[in-house]
């Protein structure tokens, strides 16, 4: 997994909390910085894809590993 | 990209029905929507400082019941005193176990994200409620004010 500037562990949280926490964390970051989100909610895969398409923050990577979902989001 | 707008009317005051308006509004705000929720009739319960929302199995055949309770206690059983309180407690526990946010938390997230919460003045008067019962930041308005925003909205939901 590529380098990232901040990490957010949203494990155990259900919709819509992973997205809301990610948005809040991104608000405090600079453009171009990368956020790594860890989630266990299977719905978050489609949600982070949709989040990135609608907000313009690039979803650089989305994968499942060890029963958890990992997302790399670059702030626009 | 122009900011999109979401207008919601929240009319219900039970624990289960408190979720859709706050989930959708907070998520829309995170996606960059300008969002307003107009609370009317029983929806006003969702604005109270101290939320005392309950869930009822009565008149709700779609509600999954634990331990096959619906078989053991048919409709009349659901009217027993304490049944609603018990179901509410069980629902809250289940939500906690599954990592579902509380209504209070979602409401706070909405306010943080600048979702505008508007109480219907007419129903506030109708139920003899007043602003001191409601959380700070609530605005009071009527149907015409709702249409001013809803008329420009991209999505408009009645919940």
Image (cartoon, coloured by chain):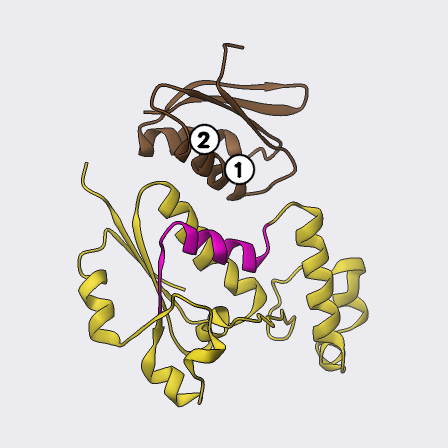
Chain colours: A brown, B yellow
Tell whether B79 sits left or right of B23: right
Residue B93's tag is none
Say which label, 1 or 2, has the lower sequence index: 1
Q: Confirm whether the magenta stretch covers residue A5.
A: no
Chain of the residue displaying label 1: A
Tell whether B35 sits left or right of B83: left
Observer-nearest of A63 and A32: A32
Tell me residue B51's x, y (percent).
57, 70
The residue wearing badge 2 is A48
For the image shown, how many numbered marks are present on the structure? 2
Q: Residue at x 58, y 25 (%)?
A: A69
Q: Confirm whether the magenta stretch covers residue B108.
A: yes
Which quadrant does the N terminus of chain B fall into?
top left
The residue wearing badge 1 is A18
Q: Residue at x 41, y 64 (%)?
A: B159
Kindly indicate the quadrant of the structure image that contains residue B131: bottom left
Observer-nearest of B51 and B14: B51
Q: Are marks 1 and 2 in contact (CB under 8 Å)?
A: yes
Q: CA distance from mark 1 to mark 2?
A: 9 Å
Tell me residue B112's x, y (percent).
42, 51
On screen, residue B44 above or below B37? below
Helix, strand or loop at label 2? It is: helix
On screen, residue B2 above or below A3? below
Question: Label 2 crowding class (10 Å Cα cut-off): few <14, some 14-19, many 20+?
Answer: many
Tell me residue A3's x, y (percent).
50, 11
Tell whether A1 sits left or right of B4: right
Region of the chain picked out in magenta, as a range: B101-118
Question: Label 1 crowding class (10 Å Cα cut-off): few <14, some 14-19, many 20+?
Answer: many
Kindly indicate the quadrant of the structure image that contains residue A74: top left
Q: Residue at x 55, y 59 (%)?
A: B103
Chain of the residue displaying label 2: A
Same subunit under labels 1 and 2?
A: yes
């Amino acid at each position: 997994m590529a380098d990232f500037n901040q990490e957010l562990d949203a494990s155990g949280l259900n919709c819509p909390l992973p997205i809301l926490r990610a948005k809040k964390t991104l608000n405090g970051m600079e453009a171009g910085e990368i956020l790594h989100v860890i989630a266990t909610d299977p719905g978050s895969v489609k949600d982070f894809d949709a989040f990135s398409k609608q907000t313009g923050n690039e979803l650089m990577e989305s994968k499942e590993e060890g029963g958890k979902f990992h997302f790399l989001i670059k702030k626009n | 990209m122009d900011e999109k707008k979401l207008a919601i009317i929240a009319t219900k005051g039970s624990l289960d029905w408190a979720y859709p308006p706050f989930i959708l509004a907070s998520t829309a705000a995170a996606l960059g929507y300008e969002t307003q929720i107009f609370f009317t009739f029983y929806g006003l319960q969702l604005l109270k400082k101290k939320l005392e929302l309950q869930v009822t199995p009565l008149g709700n055949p779609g509600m999954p019941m634990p331990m096959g309770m619906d078989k053991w206690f048919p409709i009349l059983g659901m009217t027993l005193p304490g049944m609603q309180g018990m179901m509410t407690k069980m629902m809250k526990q289940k939500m906690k176990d599954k990592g579902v946010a509380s209504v209070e938390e979602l409401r706070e997230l909405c306010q943080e994200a600048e979702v505008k919460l508007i109480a219907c003045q007419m129903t506030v008067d109708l139920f003899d409620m007043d602003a001191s019962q409601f959380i700070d930041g609530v605005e009071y308005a009527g149907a015409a004010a709702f249409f001013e925003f809803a008329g420009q909205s991209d999505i408009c939901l009645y919940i």
